[in-house]
Image: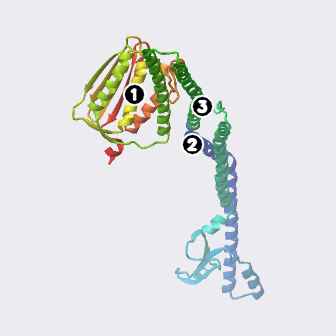
Amino acid sequence: MKIAQKLFLFFLAIIALNLLAYKFVFEEIIVEQLKNDRHEQFKEEREAANRVRINQLIRTSTFKDPTELRELTEKIPEDLMYKMIVEDAQGRQIFTKFSKAYKEAGTKVVAEYYYQHELPERGATIIRFYTDDSEILATKGVTMIVIYIYGSVIVVGLVFMVFLVRWILKPVNELALATQEIKSGKRNVTFTYKRKDEFSLLFRSFIAMVDQLRYSDERQQELISAIAHDFRTPLTTIKGYASYIASGRVTDLDRIQKQMKKIEQKAEDMDRLLEELQDYSHLSTNQALHIGRVHIKTFLQNITEEYSEKAKEAGLQFQTKIRVSNELYIEADEKKLRRVMQNLLNNAIYYNKVDGSILVTCDQREQHVLFSVIDKGEGISQEDLAKIFTKFYRAEKSRNRNNGGTGLGLTICKSIVEQHGGQITATSELGEGSCFSFTIPFYPKEAASA
C-alpha cells in the first residue's frame, strides 16, 4: 500500500474516532450546557422584563416613592439588550426606551414580553430582548463547542504528525545509516524495512545501486590484476625473444623474422590494451565527438580489407554484405566508429570456433544505418548476455585473460554508439554463435534537433 493511501486511511480513522468521541462522550455534555445557558438567559430576561415593567408603572403612577424608584431603577440590568415600547389603547407608540447595551445593527429578537395595563384604555407595555453573535459566542455551551472543535483539530493534527514523522523518519534513518556504512567502505548492507510502498521501491533501487557499486569494485580489482597479467605476459615474451636474438645464437634470418613477428604481435596486444583503457578514460570524461562526413562504403571496405586478412590468418571465413547506396554519407566520428567495428570484429575472431566464419553486414534504413557482425563461434549464455555491456564484465575470465581482454570493450562500444544517438544490441545462442548489431543515425542528435 502506498504512503498516500496509508495516510488517507489513517486520517479517516482519526476523524471517525473523533466523531465517535463526540457522539458518545461530548454531545450530551455540550447539549446539556446549551440548555442550561438558554434557561439562565430566559430567567435573566424574565426578571429584567418584570423590573422594567414595574419601573414603568412607578414612573406613570400618581404616587411615587423616590427612594423605591431609585433602587428599582438601579437594579435594572443595562448589560442586556432590550427595547421597551409603551403603546396607548389605539396601538400608537407613546414612549420608547433602549438599554445602554442595545445596538441596532446585527441584532435579533430572542424574546418578547407583552404587558397589558390594568386599565385597557391606558394601553400596554412591550419589552423585546435582543442578542448578537458576540453574546451567543460568550455562552458556556458555545464556548465548549468552539474549544472542542479547536481541540479536536489540534489533537488530530498532533497525532497525524506523530505518525507521519514516524513513518517517514524510520526508513529515512535506516537509509542514512546504510549510506554511512557504504561511505565507510562496507558493501554488504541489509534493510529491515519490509512494507510495500514508495520507500520499499527506494530501498530496492538503493540495494541495486549498492550491488552495482560492489560489482564495479570487484571488477576493478579484477581489472588491475588482469592489466598486470596482460602486460607481464607480452613483456616476458618480448624480453625472452629480444634476449635470445641479442645473444647472437640465432643466425637464421627466417627464424629471426619469425621471432621479430612474435615480438611485434605482443607489442600490438599491449598497444590494443592501452587503447582500450584510454578509450574508456575518454568516455568517462564525456569528451565531445569529432563529427565529420563518413562515406559508408569506403569506411567498411577499409575495415573489411584489414580484418579479412586477420580472419584468414585465424583460419576463419570472412564475408561481407553491404547493402547501401554508393552515395550514402553519414555525420559521425569516424575514428570512434572504427573503434566500435574493431572491438566487435576482434571479439568475433577471438571467440570463434576452428574453421568458423564471420559475416559483416550493413543495411540502409530510413533514418539510420544498421551495422551487424555475425560469428559462428562459441556463443554467449543468456545469463551473461544480459550483462555483457556492463563495464568490467568478463563472461569467461580465463578466456578474456588469454586474449588480453579487460571487460571494457563492449562498454566502450555501447557508449560510442549512444553518443551518436544510436543503439546496440546482441543476440546469441550458446554453441551456435552471436550477432552484434548497432545503428548510427544519418545525422547526430545535436544536428537533428537543430
Q: Residue at x 37, y 38 (%)?
A: 420
Residue on which the image places disc 3: 217
Q: Relative to 169, does residue 400 appear above or below in the rendering? A: above
In the rendered image, residue 438, in percent from the top left (x then y), is placed at: 36, 29
Which mark is nearer the camera, 2 or 1? 1
Q: Residue 342, which numbered label?
A: 1
Give the residue number, with chain letter if any, for mark 2: 8
Q: Amino acid at mark 3?
A: Asp
Residue 20, horizontal then vertical, whole percent: 64, 44
Front residue of 83 and 198: 198
Residue 304: name its quadrant.
top left
Residue at image coords 34%, 32%: 439
Q: Outermost residue, left direction?
A: 326
317 relative position to 66: left or right: left
Q: Image quadrant for the N terminus?
A: top right
The amino acid sitting under disc 1 is Gln
Judging from the image, what secondary structure is the residue with disc 3 in? helix
| Disc 1: CA contacts within 10 A as few (<14), some (14-19) or many (>=20) | some
Q: Amino acid at mark 2?
A: Phe
Q: Where residue 15 sits: x, y (%)? A: 61, 46
Q: Earlier in the sequence, mark 2 or mark 3?
A: 2
CA separation, marks 3 and 1? 27 Å
Would residue 77 be found to the left or right of residue 294 on screen?
right
